[in-house]
Amino acid sequence: MNNTFILFYRREWQLMFRNTSTLVQPLCFFVIIALLFPFSLPAENELLRRIGGGVIWVSAVLATLLSLESMFKADFQDGALEQWLTHPRSLAVAMMGKAFAHWSATGLLLTLFSPVLCLTFRIPTEQIWVLFLGLLLGTPSLSLIGAIGAALTVTLHRGGVLLAIIILPLYIPILIFGAGMITQSAQGADIAGQVYALLAMLMLSITLAPFAIAGALRATIE
Amino acid sequence: MPDQPASLIAEGLECIRGERTLFSNLSLALREQQCLHVVGANGSGKTSLLRIISGLNRADQGEILWHNETIVNNPRFFKESTQIGHKDGIKNELTAAENLAFYQQLEGVDDESLVDQYLAQMGILRCADLTANRLSFGQRRRLAFARLLQPIYKLWILDEPFTGIDVDGRQLIENVCLDHLNNGGMIVLTNHQDLQRSLLGGHLVELQL
């Protein structure tokens, strides 16, 4: 087992299965937030259909944000982070493994569940797939960018609000293109532009975020 | 072996915390088979010095050399050194064996028989399948030490290794340290009690902060 990425990815999964609340909580939060809207809005199918995609995207962003605060907390408190900081293995690659494990447990799970939510918003089938694709391409960036904020606030006692203030503005571009995809396809227009934009942001976060996470951890732990 | 060159050398170290200078112009040299005992009152900068030596923090002045090369971004130093601080790096959710196996895999080794061997050496083999949150403080401490038994580590940096463990545990850890030193290893540690009369007495070098 000599691959740093796989080693850390596997370890995160092992920890998450021992502590299942980290797996279940974001998903429950996601579903509940999204379901609040049909209850609080006028019962018009047309209205729900139009806002559904945006609501599901915002719920996904909030659910990701909720799970970010605990991302490095335990590793900081029990000293595991200090062990990684003084280890010759690449911290950036290790943290990429961690961020992808985080995505598998939040973003990927939410994406897989989103078609069910689409039904409550009466979103037509072809747009369900558009939303699914958008979430699949967008949520990994949410985890990777969010991990930078989580690393910056890991030493703070109540870093949650600060984390939200740092990270949410950075999520806006992903939100614009992700939710824009659905509006676009509802009008029968081509969504290739949005797909490329989301892909570009994904590539950017895969290549840059791990180094930012590692740098943020080194700076905050010192 | 006094003519042997020192492996770990620190020159002109200075550490400032806020307004206070904890230490300045501090130099030290450590050879194989030596154990550096950092002595000082609470708040005198023992932990800060250990964090600087382990590469977690930077000194405000001065530099540290490992085999004549600076330890900053030095993969060889990070490979050959390891530290146990106040926090032990043990995951509550994982069993003792899983915790140890991860640290072994981190060093590129994947051998379950070695995990058992290290746990047995620390006298906690019967706890191998208990999750770490069910271990007593002393057992956790022993588990943290089991990680050090990997032969890849030459330099152990230990912050108060004897705190909170019983007489047997202390004896065991002293023995493990002694073996490490006799095999050509090095230790930097802090401890509140005098160590001259311990098993490590013959290898001790004291540094007063």
Image: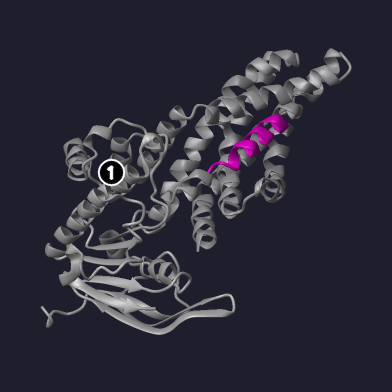
> Which residue is nearer to you in this view: A23 or B158?
B158
Can residue A199 be seen here? The reply is no
Q: What stretch is highlighted in magenta?
A: A57-71
Tell me if A107 is positioned left or right of B172 in this view. right
Q: Is the magenta stretch mostly helix, strand or loop?
A: helix
Name which residue lies at 59% across and 79% down.
B19
Crowd band around label 1 with a 10 angstrom C-alpha radius: few (<14), some (14–19), many (20+): some
Can residue B15 be seen here? The reply is yes
Based on the picture, tell me whether residue B73 belongs to the magenta stretch.
no
Q: Position of residue B63 (x, y in %)?
A: 38, 79
Residue marked by disc 1: B105
Figure quadrant of residue B112 = top left
Tell me if A137 is positioned left or right of B117 in this view. right
Q: Position of residue A154 (x, y in %)?
A: 57, 51
Tell me if A175 is positioned left or right of A6 in this view. right
Q: Is residue B192 above or below residue A180?
A: below
Based on the picture, tell me whether residue A61 belongs to the magenta stretch.
yes
Name which residue lies at 34% across and 65% down.
B191
Q: Position of residue B108 (x, y in %)?
A: 25, 47
Name which residue lies at 47% across and 46% down.
A75
